[in-house]
Image (tube, rainbow, N blue to C red):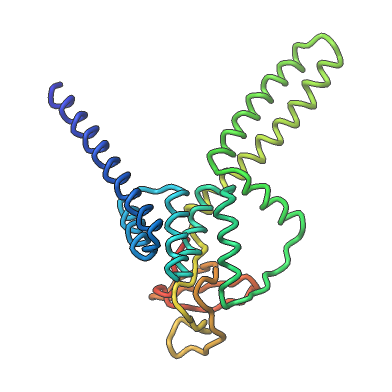
Amino acid sequence: MNKLVKLVVVVILLAVVGSIKADNQLQKAADLYAAQSYEQAADVYANILKTDVVSPELYYNYANACYKSGQLGKAILNYERALVLRPNYEDAKFNLTFVNAQIADKIEPIEQFFLTEWLESLGSLQTANQWAITSISGFVVCLILALLYVFASHRSLRKVGFFGAITCLVISVAALSYSFSLQHKAQERAEAIVMVGAMPLKSAPDDSGTELFVLHEGTKVVIKSSLRGWFEIRIADGHVGWVKTTQIERI
């Protein structure tokens, strides 16, 4: 029993020390950024992330430091990572739009059906956990309204219970679908950012493959498959090709 207590105390002390150390490093990075030492600030933020301390704010601040130090690809990558954790992070959205306007590649995306685009924008209003909570809440309210429908004596109350329960059930299922979709996106990590100045897109996973065209730093791509150090990618306009795995980084 005493050994268990000692172990718990040691774990707690290590957690406290780790938290204090992380806070000190965050303050150091903030001070360097305020002093316009942007590259050094970016290095400190990068080291913090290596310790598995992760948050939307940390990715956002790291992205700001990267942008200020001229690292366009890393800036876009980390704004995107901040938005994976918090899809409704307005500051990150604004800065990402601003930085994306500065990349060399101006690719026209395939036009989406307006309903698909609207549903995707609706899904970005909350995180996966928030959608899960919305789903559970909707289901609980659905059960309460279903009980109202079953036990209410007045016809008007039974109507409220019936239609209300159906509405809440639809909301619950939709919210659950959004939650699973966002979790899958975060786990799959199929999207990536070009991290090199210029990257030839090849027709085959080989240096001798035909060069289709060139992509530049900061462009977002989708990874379709991998083969012996190469990724098959798709860009926003639907074109597909092969690039070396070292030239892009997963969001």
Q: What residue lies at 65% left-to-right and 30% top-to-bottom? A: 138
11 left or right, relative to 112: left
Residue at the far top in the pictured view: 153
Q: Quadrant of residue 142?
A: top right
Determine the residue located farthest toward the front in the rendered image.
Answer: 35
**Res 214 → quadrant:** bottom right
Measured as percent of width and height from the top left, residue 87 is found at 57, 49
Name the foreground residue: 17 vs 152: 17
| Residue 10 placement: quadrant | top left
Which residue is at the front of the view, 225 or 160?
Answer: 160
Among all residues in the image, which is located at the extreme left? 2
For the N terminus, the quadrant is top left
Q: Residue at x 50, y 58 (%)?
A: 79
Q: Is residue 48 left or right of residue 188?
A: left
Q: Where does residue 162 sit, x and y in percent of width and height?
A: 79, 23
Establish if 247 lies above or below 203: above
Residue 169 screen position, x and y as percent: 70, 32
The residue sitting at 52% across, 78% down in the picture is 216
- Labels in figure, total: 0
Position of residue 84 relative to residue 149, above or below, is below
For the point 72% across and 55% down, which residue is it? 116
| Residue nearest the observer in this picture, 133 or 57 | 57
Residue reaching furthest right?
155
* Position in image of residue 238 (x %, y %): 64, 73
76 vs 58, left or right, is: right
Between 112 and 161, the one nearer to me in the picture: 112
Relative height, residue 127 to residue 37 (above, below): above
Task: Say if 56 sits above or below 41 in the image.
Answer: above
